[in-house]
Image (spheres, rainbow, N blue to C red):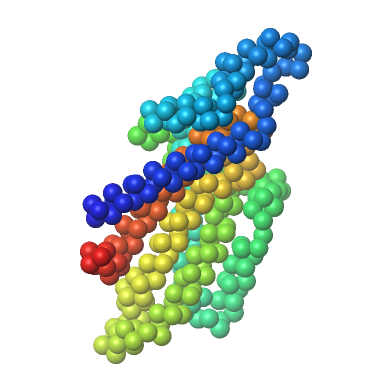
Amino acid sequence: MLVFLIRRTSQSVLVLLIMSLLVFVGVYAIGNPVDILISPEADQAEIERVIQSLGLDRPIWEQYWIFLVHAVQGDLGNSFVYNQPALQLILERMPATLELAFAAIIISIVLGIPLGMIAGLRPDAWYSRMIMSVSILGFSLPTFWVGLMMIMVFAVMIGWLPASGRGDTVDLFGVPVSFLTWDGLQHLLLPAINLGLFKISLVIRLTRAGMRENLLMDYVKFAYAKGLSSSRVIFLHVLKNILVPIVTVVGLELGNVIAFAVVTESIFAWPGMGKLLIDSIGLLDRPIVVAYLLITVLMFIIINLVVDILYSVLDPRVRLGEMKS
C-alpha cells in the first residue's frame, strides 16, 4: 500500500505540473484582462501602471515561473477583479459546490440502484420498460433545458420550490451548509436533481446490466439450491457484486459532477465555484480561472485514489493482486 501511495503521489505531482502549464498558457492566450479591467478613458500612463502592478509586463515564461514558486507555497495569486487571494475566493465557495455535488450523487444512488434492480429482475415487465425509457430521457435531455423546465414548472407554475439561491445555512464544523435547514433543503432540491439526472440514468443502466449478468451466474444458482430466500440472494450476494462497478463509476463521476456543475449553478444562481468561474472568464480574471482548474484536477486525483481504495475493499481480489505485483 505504501508503494502504491508513493507512486500515485509522484504521478499526481506530474499531472498537476503539466496541467498548470497547459492552463496557464491557454488562459494567457485568450485575451488581455487590462482591456476589461481598465476604463477606456484611462491614459497610457495609467494603463502601464496597472499592467506593471498585475505583473503582465513580464514574458509568459517568467510569469509562469513566478506562479509556480508561489503555488508551491500555497499562493495561487490574487484575483484581478476582487484583489483577494484566488484560493481564498474559491475555498469560500467550495462548500456550496461540494454540497450540491454530493446531493446529486446521493440522489442518483438512492433512486438509481433500486430502479435498476427492479428493471433487472423483471426486464419484460411494463414498469421495467418505463424505467429504461425514462433513463434514455435522462441521457438525452440537455441539462440547461431540464433546469429551465424545472424552474418553470416547480417554481413558477406550481410554486412548490424556490427558483434560485442557496437559502438559509447553518455552520457544520465551521462550514456553512444548507441541507440542515428546511429553507436550504428546498433550495437544494431542484439543482441537485437537475445535476444528478444524467447520473441517475447511468446508475440505473449499470445496476440493470449487473443484475442481468449476475443472476445467470453459478453462485446464484448454488445459493438458490442451498435453500436461500430470493431476498437474501439478491441483497446479500448479487447486490454486493454489482456494487463494485457502480462504486467505481459513481466515484469517478463525482469528479465530473464537481467540475461540470457550472451549468446548474448558473441556471439556479447557486453560489458555488462554477458560478465564480463563469464570472471570472467573462472578466478574464486569470488567477481565478487557473486556481479553479488546478483545484478541480486535484479533486479528480483525490477522488480516483479513494475509488481505488474502496474498490480493493469491495473486491479483495484487487488487493491480493496488488500485493503479488
Question: Relative to residue 94, is residue 316 depicted above or below?
Answer: below
What residue is drawn where x is 30% and y is 62%?
A: 312
Query: Is 13 in front, or is 272?
Result: 13
Q: Nearer the viewer, residue 249 or 295?
A: 295
Residue 101 vertical placement versus 244 (above, below) = above
Q: Position of residue 296 (x, y in %)?
A: 48, 43
User: In the displayed structure, does residue 137 sit left or right of residue 222?
Assistant: right
Q: Quadrant of residue 211?
A: bottom left
Residue 173 location (% of width, % of height): 35, 34
Residue 50, image quadrant: top right
Q: In the rendered image, is residue 280 in sight?
A: no
Instruction: Please name the residue shown 47% across and 52% down the image.
Output: 254
Vertical placement of residue 79 versus 140, above or below: above
The picture quadrant where one finds residue 163 is: top right
Q: Hey, which residue is sitting farthest right in the picture?
A: 41
Task: Please give the name of the residue rendered at 66% of the width and 35% of the height, measured from the top-left corner.
Answer: 30
